[in-house]
Image (tube, helix red, strand yellow):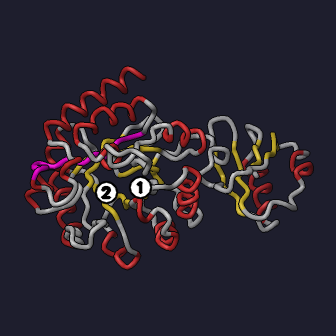
Amino acid sequence: MIVVVKPNVSDERQNQLIDWLKGMGLGVHISTGEFNTVLGLIGDTSKVDIDLIESLDIVDSVKRVTETFKQCNRKFHPEDTVVEVGDVKIGGGNFAMIAGPCSVESEEQIVGIAKAVKASGANLLRGGAFKPRTSPYDFQGLKAEGIDLLKIARQETGLPIVTEIMNLRDLPLFDDVDVLQVGARNMQNFDLLKELGKTDKPILLKRGLANTLKELLMSAEYIMSEGNDKVILCERGIRTYSDYTRNTLDLSAVPMLHELSHLPVIVDPSHATGIARLVPPMACAAAACGANGLIIEVHNDPLHALCDGAQSLRPEEYTALAKKVEKIREALA
């Protein structure tokens, strides 16, 4: 349920209303916009007297929210959420370029790629330290050493780092990581999501391989219900009947998620297609349909990459793509 407070209501009267609602055993999520304040009521609202609340002279309207996701719902929070990572802003008209290798392999590799993507306009560095792989015999990442190498790359370039967390027991290793990524396979790891909700770090939440948008938003709700509202949604392709690409990039998810939620939405065309030559057109399409950013795999030597070289762009290819994306965004402005 949401309660829309009329404009120009004093803080004292608004706080009195909030205290009264909390006295009913309800949680109250406060969203202050340019023209009014929206109070999102969380909990058992079945016994709330809508007519009584609407009769209050400071209340503009009261509406029931039928969707099971509440805190990430745009009805609860009409204004776009802007997630800040250092000086980088994601959402609300701000566009983030996240780039780097699928996995961290060495100091020379990660620092070199970090410098290259920064020169091309990237403002966050991605790199896998812990790697979930389909085969137990494939490279699983450098783990703690990989995080240390990412920190070195951050020190060399100033780029905030984004890397994936797979297990709760590893959470202490991520204390100095700027953005924690939840991969597609862990989208419904609810214990992990709840613990990440207790942190104060931005969480990049990827859509699962075969999950609906509602399920993605419910996973975001798990994080937000614990107090962390710094959530970035990521469309990375879903499994369909396609037999020529790794996954199918669901670009319709971008405007749909913007309609349903106030959270920023970015797109991963690398994992979606699995083919480097398809990444640029899909990245451009993502920018055109309203994405708040792109996360793209870049490797200095894709042929010898230890992980996902087939979908990685070379630095010079990323530079060309970044210029195209910039022109598309300028055309849409």
Give the magenta-colored segment's residue range.
292-303
Q: Nearer the viewer, residue 146 or 136?
A: 136
- State left or right for residue 61 relative to residue 274: right
The local crowd at label 1, few if under 14, some if 14 to 19, many if 20 or more residues have their Cα within 10 Å, is: many
- State left or right for residue 82 relative to residue 100: right
The residue positioned farthest toward the bottom in the image shown: 169
Residue 69 within the magenta-colored segment of the rendering: no
Residue 27 appears at what percent x and percent y? 71, 63
Identify residue for label 1.
204
Residue 175 appears at what percent x and percent y? 34, 70
- State left or right for residue 103 relative to residue 6: left
Identify residue for label 2.
162
Give the amino acid at mark 1. Answer: Leu
Labels 1 and 2: the sequence-earlier one: 2
Give the amino acid at mark 2. Answer: Val
Confirm whether residue 235 shows in the render: no
Confirm whether residue 188 shows in the render: yes
Residue 170 appears at what percent x and percent y? 34, 76
The local crowd at label 2, few if under 14, some if 14 to 19, many if 20 or more residues have their Cα within 10 Å, is: many
- Residue lying at 52% horizontally and 45% vertically, measured from the top left: 81
Could you say whether the residue bearing mark 2 is in a helix, strand or loop?
Answer: strand
- Residue lying at 15% horizontally and 41% vertically, measured from the top left: 315
Q: Are marks 1 and 2 in contact (CB under 8 Å)?
A: yes
Q: Where is residue 121, by image quadrant? A: top left
Where, quadrant-wise, is the C terminus in this rendering?
top left
Q: Is residue 256 above or below residue 136?
A: above
Q: CA distance from mark 1 to mark 2?
A: 8 Å
Could you say whether the residue bearing mark 1 is in a helix, strand or loop?
Answer: strand
